[in-house]
Amino acid sequence: MSVAIDIFECMFEYEGMASAAAILDDSPTRATVDELQARIRSMQTTTLDTRTIPTHPAIARLLPGGGLKEGATYSVDNSATLLMALLAGPSAAGSWCGVIGVPEFGVEAAQHFGIDLERLVLVPHPGEHWLGVTAAIADVISVVVTRPPKRASDSSVARLSARLRQRGATLIVLGPWPQSEAMLSLSDSRWSGIGQGNGHLSARQATVTVSSRMGRPQSARLWLPDPHEQFREVDRFAQPEPGSPRQGSSFPEPAHLHEAAG
């Protein structure tokens, strides 16, 4: 390996260009360079063929690659319901999930939405050690959620990203995060179920938008959840279900539901 480093250093020195060509003519050295090139091609192939973790089909079709990529990071714009929709698929497929620094994460709501509590790890208050806890959890758990209390340094982000790639873990960050694969956000959220002064909130429609580094943002109108507590895409041509939002109806999200499934 030291021979190859010497070669690359020599190649990028203006005065040593001629000697670099002479060194490369040496057959043992050329074999070393060929080995390095093979390694690079192998690493590139591994990156391009990164495995994906299944998530909800209605959301997966909006994501680059059609799912959550192992070793990648995703940002969610402060929505616990959207977060649970992302976790439900991996959890149902047998993956362990960890949630760090989100004390209001509602386990009852999570269970209703299909997250297996037997494979769920919660660290509600990691304190100032949130980054170290996140990295440690990523060593043993497939999908890790964290909410940074402050901005991480560039070097810390780079080290954590390298660790995720090495372990094949997927990180979901509540809030912005440098170099995230995609940002997921909600807009035009409308609850239904309240009549003329009576009833209770039973379902919600919202527009989910996925903005990635590559390509244009992708959006879809989803039930989050529908009256049967299911996540699914809104059928624009279907007849309205009982209790479904009427055109123009809009209800603010109550605080207790925001804490459980915002």
Image (tube, rainbow, N blue to C red):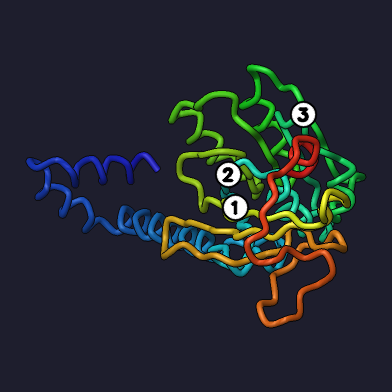
Question: What separation in Å lies between label 2 and label 1 (alpha carbons)?
Answer: 7 Å
N-terminal label among 2 and 1: 2
Disc 1 residue type (three-letter): Leu
Seen at 65% across and 63% down, the residue is 59
Near mark 2 (Cα within 10 A), the count class, few <14, some 14-19 or many ≥20, is some
Numbered disc 2: secondary structure:
loop
N-terminal label among 1 and 3: 3
Q: Which residue is mark 2?
A: 77
| Image height of 15 relative to 26, above or below | above
Disc 3 residue type (three-letter): Pro
| Image height of 153 relative to 138, above or below | above
* Near-viewer residue (126 or 195): 195
Question: What separation in Å lies between label 3 and label 2 (alpha carbons)?
Answer: 17 Å
Q: Which residue is mark 3?
A: 103
Whether pointer 3 and pointer 2 mark residues with C-beta atoms closer than 8 Å, the reply is no
Whether residue 216 sits left or right of residue 131 in the image: it is left
Whether residue 100 sits left or right of residue 112 in the image: it is left
Q: Percent position (x, y) of residue 252?
A: 68, 45
N-terminal label among 3 and 2: 2
Near mark 1 (Cα within 10 A), the count class, few <14, some 14-19 or many ≥20, is many
Whether residue 53 sits left or right of residue 107 in the image: it is left
